[in-house]
Image (cartoon, grey):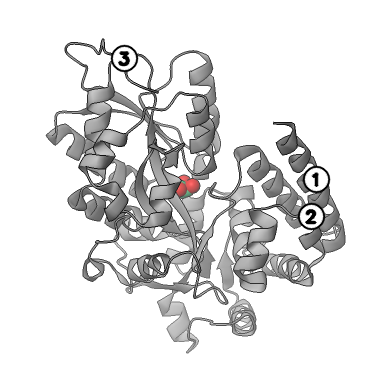
Amino acid sequence: MLRPATAAVSPPASLQVLHWWTSASERKAANLLVAYAAADNVTWMDSAIPGGAGLAAVKVLRSLVLANDAPEVTQIIGASIGEWAELGMLLELDAPAQAGNWNAVLFPAIYKLVQHRQHVVAVPIGIHRINTLFYNRALFARLKLKPPKSWSEFEQIALKFNAEGIAALALSSEPWQVATLFENLLLASGGQQLHRELFVRMNAQALSDPRLTEALERLRLMKSWTKQPIAERNWTEVVQELANGEAAMLVMGDWAKGELNVTGLPTDGVFSCSAMPGTEKFNLYSVDTLTMFTKDYAHSPAQEKLARLLLTPAVQTGYNNVKGSVSVRRDADPARMDSCARASWTAFGLGASAQVPSLVHRMSVDEVARDAVIAEINHFFADDSVTPAQARQRLGAVFRALHLRRSDH
Ligand code: BGC
């Protein structure tokens, strides 16, 4: 939307910011942004909604908008950016993008992600790698093991830990955590192509691919690798299990690294990371972005200022080091990254052949489709009597319904 000529005379420089960063490391990373903004005379009024992966924040945002009380800045990510932009609610950030030369400094996929109808409508701040396997080094050393590179090694290692009475895998039954693990398994079994058919295109024909059945069977098997009985716990508790040596491995996205670092555990100390076995060449990614609501345009100078600030090299390096993600800039310095971050940033930099947009973390399909797929995976995981064939059938019904809905538009 174009800004009207009657912009406010003395624009307010305080911005309400809604996001879902509430764990210790998320908080620390957000506080860093608050401090940078303050140094630039922008007051960041924090409105953080608890709930891993944005479960509640996304809903709170909708009700605020319906009540005509949208925050000036919001964490809206992936496919939802286009939906909100289409409603004409997002401020166009072409001016700060041009001033900061975003088309040249951002990875092309990131620059594409933040645009809608040729306008920049979101500020990218970090790339998370979802196919990261974290492992407890002390436990691995005790059993003289190396991180697994293939499914069979993964399975053998899990059996060894379980035989020692140590949970091989830290995991809770929270639906997004389970679905995150499954998305990793699907990528490992089916590669980028099957992931695209199922989790981007939602192609019902691809549901008969035996590699999907394999991934479902592996998901079920991995349930036995976890602390029994599996319960629904916040992701930060699950991360602690790995830190305390109660569990040997973890697959959930590299915000887990931020959380380990903030509790005083540097990367390659108690823990290290490697790629989820079978997915080394990919970066299954999610990009955190902030968008700005237009409202009456009174806040746009401060919003534009913040947008520009967030992309500066200093903010990018500082924020991503704490958050566990990596810079969205192609000119970031890998020497200033730890081993996990460097692997992630390098894989992302390989381009389209390595980049896989995460469904669970909102990059590939819209919120309704995402929620429906997560619910089906969870249904399969929670109830051992559901067979892979039944899960495939139910996913087929979901895909078909979603396609009907798409063609309605
Ligand atoms: C977000 C991360 C966040 C994680 C856990 C993901 O969807 O992209 O920034 O740390 O959820 O809440």
Q: Residue at x 26, y 13 (%)?
A: 5
The residue labelled by disc 3 is 4
The residue labelled by disc 2 is 204
Q: Earlier in the sequence, mark 3 or mark 1?
A: 3
Could you tell me if the residues under marks 3 and 2 are in contact, i.e. CB atoms within 8 Å?
Answer: no
- The one nearer the camera, 244 or 192, is 192
What quarter of the picture does the C terminus occupy? top right
In front: label 3 or label 2:
3
Left or right for 59, reference 36? right
Could you tell me if the residues under marks 3 and 1 are in contact, i.e. CB atoms within 8 Å?
Answer: no
Label 2 sits on a secondary structure element that is helix
Q: Residue at x 60, y 41 (%)?
A: 366
Q: Earlier in the sequence, mark 3 or mark 2?
A: 3
> Can you give x and y, in whole percent of width and height, for residue 20 in the image?
43, 38
Does residue 229 appear in this view? no
Above or below, 373 relative to 230:
above
Which amino acid does the dot numbered 2 rest on? Ala
The residue labelled by disc 1 is 400
